[in-house]
Image (cartoon, coloured by chain):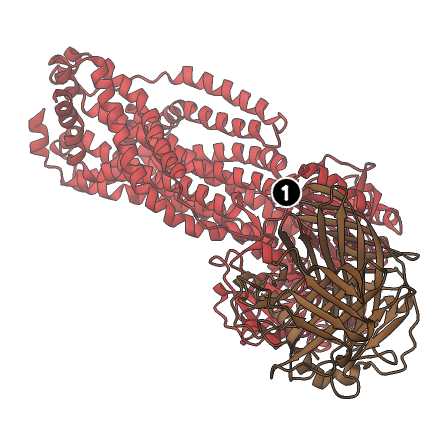
Amino acid sequence: MASLLLFYRLLVRPLFREPVRTALTIFAIALGVAVVLAIDLAGSAAAGSFRSSMETLAGDNDLEVVATGGVPESAVGTLAQLPFSLRISPRIEGFAALTDMKESLPLIGLDLVAGGSSFTGANSRTNFGAATTQDPQQGLRDLENPDAVYVGASLGHKTGEHIELLINDQSKTYTIRGVYPDANGNESAVVMDIAAAQRALTRFGSVDRILIKVPSAPSLEVWQRRLQATLPPGLEVRTQGTGTAENRRMLQAFRWNLRLLSYISLVVGAFLIYNTISISVVRRRAEIGIVRALGAGRNTVLAAFVGEAAVFGMVGALLGLPLGRVMASGAVRLMATTVDALYVSSRPGAIALTADSIVSVFVVGIGVAVASAFAPAREAALVSPVEAMARGRREYDVGVHKMRDLVIAMGLAIAAGAASRGPAIAGKPLLGYLSALLLIVASVLAIPAFVDAVTQASSQLLKRALGIEALLASRSLRASLRRTSVLVGALSTAIAMMTSVGIMVGSFRETVILWMADRLPADLYVRPAGNAAADRHPTLSLDLANAITTLPGVAAVDRLRSYEITYDGLPATLASVDLQILSSYNLRNYKKSEFFSGRPTEQVLAELSDANTVVVSEPFSYKHHVKAGDSLALSLGAVQQFFKIVDVYYDYSSERGNIIMDRNTLLKYLPDEAPSNLAVYVTPDTPVAQVRSEIMQAAGGHRILIFSNANLRGEAIRIFDRTFAITYAMEAVAIVVAVMGVAGALLALVIDRRRELGLLRFLGAAKNQIRKLILLEAALLGLLANVAGVILGFAISLVLIFVINKQSFGWTIRFHWPVAILLVALTSVYIATVVAGLYPAELAVRLNPLEVVHDE
Amino acid sequence: MNSFGATNRAYGAKPEHYFRAGICFFFFALCGNLSGQTQSLYEIARPGYAYQFPRDYFSHPGYQTEWWYYTGNVVAGDGHRFGFELTFFRQATDRDPTRDKTWDVRDLYLAHAALSDLDGGKFFHVERLNRRGPEIAGASEAQQKVWNGNWQVKWKGENQELLAIDKNFSLDLNLVSEKAPVIHGKKGISQKSAGDGHASHYISLTRMATKGELELNGKSYDVTGLSWMDHEFFTTQLDTSQQGWDWLSVQLTDRTELMLYRFRRKNGTVSPFSSGTYIDTQGKSTHLRANDFSLEADGTTWKSQTTAALYPIGWKITIPQLGIVLEAKTPLPAQELTSQTNLAPSYWEGAITLAGNRGTQALSGVGYLELTGYDHAIHLP
């Protein structure tokens, strides 16, 4: 009971006396916790519980047969006739865009005749045949009608309705022959009979996957081997959902980096708690002294302050929980966009607030609060009763061992440098993160020396420039060096994060822009309409491609074809280009080599011509540890073939990794001539706009997108920016937290210095001067934090660009200062800091000097 | 002659089967409706058809409907008796020449497999439906094979190998015909109702020595016995007055065989187009007209819990001109094939034993009995 009373008197009451500051601290924790929770929840939904959209209606099968470019459909017959009790479900997998909704849905072609169709086993609630039950005769007609589709209920359509679908470059009206329950959209797809799906996609002769349910005995591995033995070598029998597992693996690095980024807000929040509790300790020295004198032990005091922090943490977590849940909804959309743009067409799962995540919110919130409060709480416990109760004594400020700390900081910075040279551990840039962390700690330790030096050196300058208030502000900051350092540390860490990520993204963006200038030489680009995604390669009709080639004013058309493949357990893109056209029309644009070897492009292209050779992109090379001279074993159609890597090229179009070969070579193995994209070169004397409209006309009923060179670059940068939107959002939160901290700290500063400020007033300082003093302090704090933050940010950005990015994604990014963005960001932070000083300044002005000095 | 019947049953299928069920239903019930428009696409069974073997053992895509029925009575080394049925149906649905892609549905292939554990008192049956697709199902002379997935009949010279694999049971039987193929009816056609072309081409292999292995619930049996094959192809057959039929095949111990069927009309009378065939020991066949024999239910019935149909499962056969009097009984009353979907036809098809005499000579045998139209009237083209 007594300790509760102590807790109340010593801690709770002061909290209520300063509701604004208390609220700010708690809200800062809430925000920090919320960001971590939001990213965690959204990460699970968008990436962690990632399901490839192709697993829609895939059911409870055990194995699947896949091959690059499709499984020859004869394999279905082979498997169906094997003398084993198997359930064989061939599938066509593509995408259909709803013309009215601009949304891409999986297009699944199933054998709707076969009794063992995966789909009857897939989902016992699935009902494709509502239409057929009303009119059984329709059943067969639906099979014969290539326009019959079945859609998930979540689309809100009814049987018999018509629906406009864009499939590859063809937009057609289809008739909904049935609606099936799709588990709130999780199983939503456009389903067709396999024959209709092949027609819609003009993809005959192969299926995309054969799903197989095997008997429970013998083991899955035995079945896998047994079935593999019956199929041609290019076909792979693997556990069902391997693709999803691969995609998950691919997404791990992405999710991991996002999660670590989300901890920034929390780190900033930790600084603030440290600061808040430190201030409490200083301000309540007298009370602590009394309590100690009345017999409270050191541990009681320690426990009381740690307890206070724990309460902060708990309340912050309580608030952060709903906040994080709300933020997660926004984050999952941003993340899904990124996943779609960079990796794979996905379907974010539902955001699930699990018991685990709730517990972890509290553990993190309270843990961070307690950990950051421990040092000041210990300090409080060390207060001796006599000392604290001595009347008239000036406020105590713990001495800062700034020189000792500076030496440690330098040691840590050297360690950080060393860590940044280390390799990735288990595919994760752990040492890179360690390096960044060491840099932050080093910076925090170096800040007292930095603040001391700067304020000392600049005080006279300030006095001359801004008057006596500036001198006082500078001196005051220097006098309470520790408090100032903590504030500068918190704010500069947030600024450093913003700066470093800003530099990293800016450098990346600039690299991509420069790269595109080299890599997009054609005048016009044509692709099927619909949203782009890293793993979707819809094709253009061959007749359209041919028609475009013969248009007047068209010099040449490069037909690019892409396939989604798996290499060594990771998804990748296999593409082919027309070397002849590339060599004759492309080279004029190359100012420098796009290859690792530094060789001229024509030399590398010559080695690709009509040979089993490929070039691979940098991320591919990095992920699979292959380089020029190595060979890749690729399964194409039903054969397996080795391809020699002749060079590695810089590529920023996708994180997945690309393999490129000659069009003629690829056609030998996968004889599907339909191109995914066309690069159109216009003759020098023809206006590009004229050819563009000719293509539009030639397209007729085909639904295509035409990009001019500038369009395409703009589009690419738009996707790029969208991809990094979440990064910006997280930084913004960290900055808000930091600025709130500054506001709270300035408030405390004013309250602490009532006596000093009162004395100043008493000695004749005008209200304006007091206001100016406080605002100048805020301005000075902001400036110090900005300078320290930019220096730290620059150092961290080097680690991000050259270590963390490289090890996570394998991209070579050129360093670039995004000057404009940084200036805008830093200025806003700076203004926010000064604005945060307004309220405390007003408070200071309103102090009654008589009353304050009376205290003394 | 065999069951190709369907029902107009109210829909009571589990939802997951709706789609498939619709097809099955169509498969059986609606060809008639479609045939109005498409009949001209198909040939009809006409007198004077020139049979040629082995060609005519395989597919006749010019006709709309075709089926292959294998039934048999076998016994394991320990005396355990089994009956089996393995049937393949082909139903043409489309002959549009522009629809020539692999997965285009031109024919639907339905198959039934059933195993009667006569001494164990259990009956197992499975059905499957496929399109031809990439050789998923078919009947090909070039490949010497009639198949639906891994249910297959492979011809190896004069031998046929029957394979059927399911979760509960599997068959691997070798069949050798001891007699030449029988062509039922007159002038190469088996007339089923009044009118030109209301007939089928109907071939049987009536006595096939059978040896092989069957597996039931993990236990395997070496078996021997006798099998019967029916193969019919036609485009139109019945008329609307017909309710169903009772059909049986009989293999007698004196190395003769009998095939008999009678059509029941909706008004309760028996159609004059009922007929039969008698095959003597040399393989010579005699056509039996409706009034050459009598086929009467003896009052033994079995009521299906699933379809509520009341099947007459005991019969008395009299063929005065041959002096044959036989009683057909079944060791296992429950041999009804109910569609998994409840929409496809349900029918009773099961192993029977026969006892009686020819003149004064005692006579016995084994056979298969098929009863259709006991729950609903049959629709056939």
Q: Chain of mark 1?
A: A
Pinpoint residue A781: horizontal percent, then vertical percent.
Answer: 34, 34
Which residue occupies the foreground of this view, A662 or A457?
A: A662
Residue A595 appearing in the image: no
Residue at the spot 26% in from the left edge and 20% down from the top edge = A397
Question: From the image, which quarter does the C terminus of chain A lie in?
Answer: top left
* Vertical position of residue B348 compared to residue B51: above or below: above
Q: For chain A, what colour was chosen?
A: red
Question: From the image, which quarter does the N terminus of chain A lie in?
Answer: top left
Callout 1: helix, strand or loop?
A: helix
Residue at the spot 76% in from the left edge and 88% down from the top edge = B195
Residue A329 appearing in the image: yes
What residue is shown with label 1? A246
Residue at the spot 91% in from the left edge and 74% down from the top edge = B51
User: Which amino acid is tagged 1?
Assistant: Glu
Residue at the front extreme? B360
Which residue occupies the foreground of this view, A670 or A235?
A: A235
Residue at the spot 55% in from the left edge and 69% down from the top edge = A178
Q: Quadrant of residue B285?
A: bottom right
Pinpoint residue A101: horizontal percent, then vertical percent.
Answer: 52, 68
Q: Residues within 10 Å of mark 1 (few under 14, many from 20)?
A: some
Q: For chain B, what colour was chosen?
A: brown
Pinpoint residue A599: horizontal percent, then vertical percent.
Answer: 82, 42
Q: Quadrant of residue A695?
A: bottom right
Pinpoint residue A611: horizontal percent, then vertical percent.
Answer: 89, 48
- Tell how many labels: 1
Which residue occupies the foreground of this view, A626 or B275?
A: B275
